[in-house]
Image (cartoon, grey):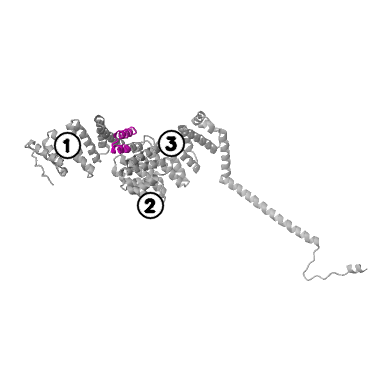
């Protein structure tokens, strides 16, 4: 009874605004809220995934990434299938001879180009350079302007240089430079341009052809960045050197000055800039400033044609510095090192070789190693047909023959050398005088007085320099001319010749007395119609 009364007791009154929910209602609310959250998350994920997938798919298709990946995979599969690297030389040559038939089954252009490049690359590595060029030449005409293909052109050019196929290398380097420029990669563009300069400087071609090619490259090097300025300086040094070899001393000096200006104020010096600056400084007479630049270029560890040409040129100029110091053994060692660097890189028809042998020959001549010097001069004459490059080694060989007592071998060399001087370097008066003096002495020894008189007279007319060697040569020519005129009994001319000698030997007792004795002897023999003055009085 008491329990019933308790259950019938009314509940406590609710506060104002408070609602009472049964437990199942609360749990239903919580479940609905959770379901809504999950639904919202799933909807958001679905929308984001769909949009991201569509956007990513569109980007991959439009950017070419998928196509590139597929092409690369296909290329690898095709090249693996071809297995060209393990093919025989005969099979490779057959493919190269008819590329169209060999790869006609490959329809995708990109994969076809990859297969052709792979063939060319294998041919290059096998040393089959002409066959490789037959594949590369048409291939490189249709390649896309992509950096990868520019590197391949550069690689091919270096292979052709190693085989001394400079025409093929020239084409590859030009294409590489163009593609690198289109892709705005100046460092690699300058690398290709540097190799192109080295090709023109090292190729077996005439001086005129080399000058024209280098001037053409120079006209394209317009940018003012440091790399381009150093390349411009290098080209100018090569042009100046060619002008000097051709006897154009004034033009050579101008080019060396321009090279020096182009290579000034450099923050980072490349090998091309170092050797060009050093060479220009030495050519312009500043050996002290030139040496550190040349040392920097000589120590360059690179192995490309441009690096080899820079090192060889630096060693030749360093040899001149050592020679000026009287260090002949060191100078000769440097020239032998230059030869070792250039062997296999610079072909024998290039001007480098006659210049190297000629320079080394004169060094041997200076230390009286006449037989060894003659070997170098002979080698210089054997490596060129360029008229201007024949002049100095012909004179050197003739001098060696004279020192060895072989006048018969010396005479034709001197006569031909003089003819070349008259034709190609008439402005070099001292050289003309020096050669005529040698010929005069040789004719004199052979008793050819008329020929000797002409040679001595021309020597006197041209020897007007003020260096000690030039003054001594002029005096020797004047004495020879005076003696020959006396032998020919051309008394008035002989007397006048001795008059020219006298003031030059005023401080040389024996020669002075000889001149005065000859003048006293000759004076009475001069016909009355050809009066002669009194011998000049001796001066203390």
Which residue corresponds to mark 2? 265
Name the element at disc 1: helix
Q: Are marks 3 and 1 in contact (CB under 8 Å)?
A: no
Q: State the separation of the CA atoms marked 1 and 2.
A: 54 Å
The residue sitting at the top extreme is: 90
Which residue corresponds to mark 1? 481
Tag 1: Cα neighbours inside 10 Å, few (<14), some, or many (≥20)? many
Is residue 146 in sight in this rendering? no
**Viewer-proximal residue among 529 and 361:** 361
Which residue corresponds to mark 3? 162
Tag 2: Cα neighbours inside 10 Å, few (<14), some, or many (≥20)? few
| Mark 1 / mark 2, whichever is N-terminal | 2
Residue 483 picture quarter:
top left
Horizontal side of 9 relative to 42 (left or right) equals: right
Q: State the separation of the CA atoms marked 3 and 2.
A: 34 Å
Q: Which residues are magenta?
A: 358-385
Count the marks.
3
Horizontal side of 525 relative to 310 (left or right) equals: left
Is residue 152 in sight in this rendering? yes
């Amino acid at each position: 009874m008491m329990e019933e009364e308790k259950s019938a007791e009314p509940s406590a009154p609710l506060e104002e605004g408070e609602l009472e929910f049964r437990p199942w209602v609360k749990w239903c609310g919580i479940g609905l809220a959770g379901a809504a959250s999950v639904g919202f998350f799933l909807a958001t994920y679905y929308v984001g995934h769909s949009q991201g997938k569509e956007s990513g798919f569109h980007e991959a298709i439009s950017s070419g990434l998928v196509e590139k990946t597929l092409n690369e995979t296909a290329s690898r599969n095709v090249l693996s299938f071809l297995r060209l690297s393990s093919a025989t030389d005969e099979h490779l040559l057959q493919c190269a001879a008819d590329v169209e038939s060999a790869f006609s089954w490959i329809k995708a252009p990109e994969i076809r180009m990859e297969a052709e490049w792979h063939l060319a690359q294998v041919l290059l590595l096998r040393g089959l350079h002409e066959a490789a060029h037959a594949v590369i030449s048409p291939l490189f005409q249709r390649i896309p302007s992509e950096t990868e293909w520019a590197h391949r052109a550069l690689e091919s050019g270096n292979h052709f240089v190693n085989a001394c196929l400079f025409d093929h290398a020239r084409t590859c380097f030009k294409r590489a430079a163009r593609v690198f420029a289109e892709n705005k990669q100046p460092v690699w563009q300058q690398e290709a341009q540097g190799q192109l300069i080295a090709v023109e400087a090292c190729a077996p071609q005439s001086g005129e052809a080399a000058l024209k090619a280098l001037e053409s490259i120079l006209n394209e090097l317009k940018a003012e960045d440091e790399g381009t300025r150093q390349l411009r300086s290098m080209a100018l040094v090569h042009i100046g050197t060619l002008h000097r070899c051709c006897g154009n001393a004034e033009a050579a000096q101008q080019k060396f000055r321009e090279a020096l200006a182009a290579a000034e104020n450099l923050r980072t010096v490349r090998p091309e800039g170092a050797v060009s600056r050093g060479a220009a400084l030495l050519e312009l007479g500043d050996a002290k400033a030139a040496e550190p630049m040349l040392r920097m270029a000589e120590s360059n560890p690179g192995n490309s044609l441009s690096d080899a040409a820079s090192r060889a040129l630096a060693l030749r100029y360093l040899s001149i510095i050592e020679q000026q110091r009287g260090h002949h053994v060191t100078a000769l060692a440097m020239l032998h090192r230059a030869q070792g660097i250039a062997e296999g890189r610079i072909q024998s028809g290039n001007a480098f070789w006659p210049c190297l042998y000629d320079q080394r020959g004169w060094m041997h001549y200076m230390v009286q190693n006449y037989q060894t010097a003659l070997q170098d001069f002979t080698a210089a004459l054997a490596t060129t047909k360029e008229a201007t490059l024949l002049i100095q080694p012909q004179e050197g060989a003739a001098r060696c023959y004279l020192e060895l007592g072989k006048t018969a071998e010396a005479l034709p060399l001197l006569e031909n050398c003089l003819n070349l001087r008259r034709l190609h370097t008439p402005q070099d008066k001292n050289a003309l005088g020096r050669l005529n003096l040698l010929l005069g002495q040789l004719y004199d020894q052979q008793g050819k007085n008329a020929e000797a008189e002409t040679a001595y007279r021309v020597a006197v007319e041209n020897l007007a320099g003020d260096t000690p060697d030039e003054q001594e040569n002029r005096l020797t020519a004047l004495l020879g001319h005076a003696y020959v005129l006396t032998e020919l009994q051309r008394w008035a001319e002989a007397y006048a010749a001795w008059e020219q000698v006298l003031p030059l030997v005023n401080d040389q007792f024996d020669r002075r007395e000889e001149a005065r004795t000859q003048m006293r002897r000759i004076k009475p023999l001069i016909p009355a119609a050809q009066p002669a003055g009194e011998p000049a009085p001796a001066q203390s």
